[in-house]
């Protein structure tokens, strides 16, 4: 049990490193703020995030996010939980199932993603579940830990974090050419990727974490970051 739990702690740390934020900081984040990390963007629910690479455009809106306890996994860590402290907290975290439902709107060719109505809409659920497998390198994530928008698949983290890193690259730290743009829009009919207020972000290890209230996102001082 101890060996399995140790491996799970390592895997949890790897997932957390994608967005470089502690659990305490995450809980303190206002639900009405955009958070921009060097490795991705976190959005308030029901607001639209734009994704772009080459001639592909995509819009994503998270509708709901929630978590559940996997009682079977939690039961396997009974002795660790009885010990209390960080071991118990880590065991509980390793037993969580996290989900987010979202809408995605995809268009392959150009900036008229929404204006002419010729986009593809899909409704999906992202998930991260308790890890499975006996030991490394056979431990795997059985959930769907990415955002899918047409052929675009970017890593996702609970609740609404979208990474610049595509699925299959782990937490590999480099620029893969994806750009993300948070917006205050809530209705897909309002989206215009040619809007001059939009600010596109890319992977940048030198960028410090920024918290921007959604109603201040397009203020002059924020758009000039």
Image (spheres, helix red, strand yellow):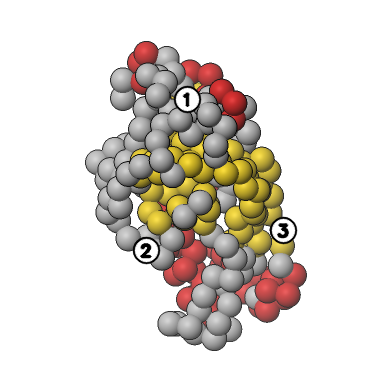
Crowd tier of the residue under label 2, counting other residues whose Cα lies within 10 Å: few below 14, some 14–19, many 20 or above: few
Q: Name the residue under label 1.
A: 192
Crowd tier of the residue under label 3, counting other residues whose Cα lies within 10 Å: few below 14, some 14–19, many 20 or above: few
Q: How many labels does the image show?
A: 3
Q: How far apart are marks 1 and 3 (CA)?
A: 37 Å
The answer to whether residue 159 is above or below residue 222 is below
Q: Is residue 182 visible?
A: no
> Mark 1 or mark 3: which comes first in sequence?
3
At numbered mark 1, what does the secondary structure look like: helix, strand or loop? loop
Which residue is pictured at 36% across the width and 42% down the height? Answer: 55
| Residue 173 position in % (x across, y down) | 30, 56
Residue 119 versus residue 163: which sits nearer the camera? 119
Which residue is pictured at 72% across the width and 58% down the height? Answer: 68
The answer to whether residue 146 is above or below residue 224 is below
Name the side, left or right, on which 143 lies relative to 166: right
Which label number is shown at residue 169?
2
| Residue 161 position in % (x across, y down) | 50, 46
At numbered mark 3, what does the secondary structure look like: helix, strand or loop? strand
Q: Distance between the residues labelled 1 and 2?
A: 30 Å
At numbered mark 2, what does the secondary structure look like: helix, strand or loop? loop
Residue 43 versus residue 192: which sits nearer the camera? 192
The answer to whether residue 134 is above or below residue 62 is below
Determine contact: label 2, label 3, CB under 8 Å: no
Residue 195 versus residue 26: which sits nearer the camera? 195
> Mark 1 or mark 2: which comes first in sequence?
2
Q: Which image quarter: residue 207?
A: top left
Q: Distance between the residues labelled 2 and 3?
A: 27 Å
Task: Check the picture and name the quadrant holding the N terminus.
Answer: bottom right
Judged from this view, the residue extending furthest toward the right is 71
| Residue 71 position in % (x across, y down) | 75, 70
> Mark 2 or mark 3: which comes first in sequence?
3
């Amino acid at each position: 049990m101890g060996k399995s739990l140790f491996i799970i702690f390592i895997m949890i740390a790897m997932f957390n490193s994608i967005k470089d934020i502690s659990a305490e900081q995450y809980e303190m984040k206002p639900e009405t703020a955009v958070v921009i990390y060097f490795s991705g963007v976190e959005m308030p629910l029901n607001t639209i995030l734009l994704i772009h690479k080459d001639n592909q455009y995509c819009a994503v809106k998270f509708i709901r996010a929630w978590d559940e306890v996997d009682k079977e996994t939690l039961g396997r860590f009974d002795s660790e939980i009885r010990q209390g402290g960080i071991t118990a907290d880590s065991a509980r975290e390793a037993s969580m199932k996290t989900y987010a439902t979202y809408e995605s709107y995809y268009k392959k060719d150009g900036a008229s993603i929404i204006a002419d109505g010729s986009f593809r809409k899909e409704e999906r659920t992202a998930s991260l579940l308790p890890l499975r497998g006996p030991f490394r390198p056979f431990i795997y994530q059985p959930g769907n830990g990415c955002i899918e928008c047409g052929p675009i698949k970017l890593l996702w983290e609970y609740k609404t974090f979208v990474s610049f890193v595509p699925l299959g690259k782990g937490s590999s730290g480099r620029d893969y050419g994806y750009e993300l743009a948070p917006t205050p829009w809530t209705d897909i009919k309002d989206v215009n990727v040619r809007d001059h207020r939009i600010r596109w972000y890319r992977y940048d290890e030198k960028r410090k974490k920024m918290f921007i209230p959604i109603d201040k996102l397009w203020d002059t001082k924020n758009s000039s970051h």
